[in-house]
Image (cartoon, rainbow, N blue to C red):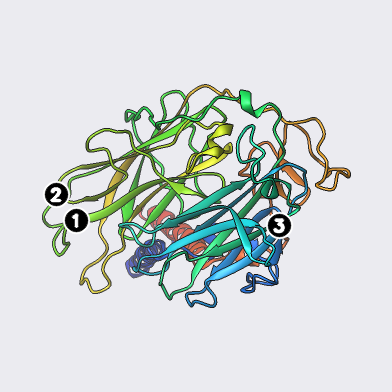
Amino acid sequence: MRSRRVPAAVAGACALAWLTLMTGYGAAAAEPHEAADLGGEPVPGGTGSTSPDDPTALDPGLWADTLGGSSTRNTHHFSYSRRMKDSTVHVGVVGAPQSGESDAVKVDVGVLGEEGDLVSCATDDSSTTNVPEALIGAAVAVGPSSAESTERTDCLRAGTLQIAVSRAYSSNTSEIPVAIKVVEEAPVTGAASLPAAEETVTFPVPDAGSARELPGAWSFEEAPALDARAGGATVATTLVQGDEQLWRVPVQWGQQVAVRATTPALGEAELEGICCGVPVRLRIIDPRRAVFAYNNDTEGEVSDGTYGGEAGELVAGSAPLRYLNRYDDDLPVVPGDFWVALSTAPLDPSAEREPLEFEVELTVAVTGRVAGEPSYPGVVVSPDDSAGPDGYSPDTPFLVADGVFSAVASGNPVVGDDEAGWLTGRRWAGIGLGVVSAACLAAGVVRLRSAR
């Protein structure tokens, strides 16, 4: 019986197809984020209301929306009805800029004033930096204004809160996909006795260990988890210009996260046609989707850099996670999954070359012992003093979806059952890559056997 040989032309075509698909998949990863990368179910009605008099009602959960770039469409109005009396409502928004222009997102949560206008209880915004298409995100907490204060009882007692999500001061005219995170936290007992917030944010910069190859993901949902305890974890990845990669790391009460990223020196040939190097950005994203980076008061320590002919280093960290952080600005306030985001600026569209790729090592460490956990009551009631929502317990104080409580704020249960949006172009490319790779492997096996 004659063995069948795989013709060289077929093997060559297979290799070419694999290489083409790999190149296309890489190119797709360098495009701006899609809405699916942010996660969430579409807001009720498909898009948020542009009328403050008729806001779109949201349940707890993670919601997907798109903000327009015109003055009449760049603010969407929502409302949220509290399920628990004296609770803290956390609202975050993360956006994926779609162009090289500056952009911003803003979240403003308040109550209706006597004139029917929004009286703000808390507001936050986030804008682009030297990497214009990297994720931006802001978050607020609306509840007690301090551990003992009775000020702004309208914000604490209001059964319904008004939420405005906008482009802030940005004049960008392109649409921007956003995800809106709404979590309701049960009231805390004895808050005044909990550890105070740090007046100055400091953190130990982790030492790099032996790196293992672990690329980050393009989306929140698919970000690989890192066990960053006990000295931290060091991973290696390849970044292409315009890429952003995410890794996931759990953080508990009393703990803080710190990150170090090192980039190699690039040769003259690699830097040909590149002016001023390649902008690189390092950020941390909290469970509510706020994007931030702190640095120690150390000369040369930065979380944004432009690297080229010399090796570079970026550093970012967080304050220890404490309940009383919520009475200061921009400090992490809830436990759960945090994300580390490493990104590079896209290649200039007018450039006559392929995007540059380079290796990066990332070291992530979670330090501090678990401590300072707040105490939650055994029973909660609704804002009108009737029975509280089903499923609550002091061990699961965060309402992360309608009727779903969690021990941490980052829980993202699916709100709907429609999974049609799962197969994005990027995932189709990944599936295609797997199919072609399998075909090439099979062809190689046949060819190898025929040569024996």
Q: Quadrant of residue 144?
A: top right
Which labelled disc corresponds to residue 64?
none
Residue found at x 35% / y 54%? 451
Disc 3 or disc 1, which is closer to the eye? Answer: 3
Q: Say if 225 sits above or below 350 in the image.
A: above
Going by the numbered disc 2, the residue's amino acid type is Gly
- Where disc 2 sits, the SS reads loop
Going by the numbered disc 1, the residue's amino acid type is Gly
x and y percentages locating residue 415 in the rendered image: 71, 57
Label 2: which residue?
309
Going by the numbered disc 3, the residue's amino acid type is Tyr
x and y percentages locating residue 113 in the rendered image: 67, 61
Q: Give the distance between the C-alpha atoms of the residues marked 1 and 2, in whole angstroms.
A: 8 Å
Disc 3 or disc 2, which is closer to the eye? Answer: 3
Q: Are marks 1 and 2 in contact (CB under 8 Å)?
A: yes
Instruction: Report whether 85 appears left or right of 295.
Output: right
